[in-house]
Amino acid sequence: MTRAVCTIDQAGSLAHVRDLMIRGGYGQLPVLSDDRQIVGLLTERDLVAAQALAERVNRRFADLTVADVLPPDALDRVVCIAPDTPREDVAEALTRSGVIACLVTPGGLPDTAPPGIITHADVLYQM
């Protein structure tokens, strides 16, 4: 599990998020609402799609927010789990179609910012 998870706000600038992802080496980042609830996962692919969309509709990438480009299935990309979730359950969750990461929250619910994240790479390195 990666601790001290970097999260982004859905109202945040997409250009800022792009720079953060590049500088930090992040492939995906959890997105939080104004009240700090998890609303999904933004991926590098979403940024590429946003750039293409901006070019098609003559809109500046710098004017877009995370909320503008967050796909409808963004919350389906994560499974929220409690800190004491067994490894087998984490591995099973990560095999579900479309799931990119498990977000560790105190109650295993998307109602708070995650203090931890588990990705496929984390499981792979523990094999």
Image (cartoon, rainbow, N blue to C red):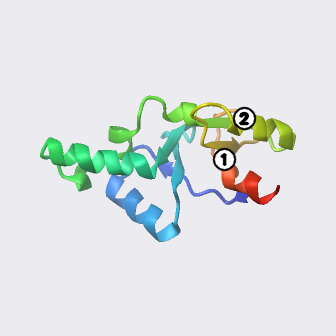
The residue lying at 82 percent from left, 55 percent from top is 127
Q: Quadrant of residue 69?
A: top left
What kind of residue is marked 1? Pro
Residue 16 vs 120, above or below: the answer is: below
Between 7 and 35, the residue placed more toward the observer is 7
Residue 110 position, x and y percent, is: 64, 34
Q: Secondary structure at mark 1?
A: loop
What kind of residue is marked 2? Ala
Specify whether 7 is left or right of 116: left
What residue is pinned by disc 1?
Answer: 114
Residue 12 vs 96, above or below: the answer is: below
The residue lying at 32 percent from left, 39 percent from top is 68
What residue is pinned by disc 2?
Answer: 93
Mark 1 Cα within 10 Å, few/some/many (few <14, many 20+)? Answer: many
Residue 98 position, x and y percent, is: 57, 34
The residue lying at 74 percent from left, 54 percent from top is 124
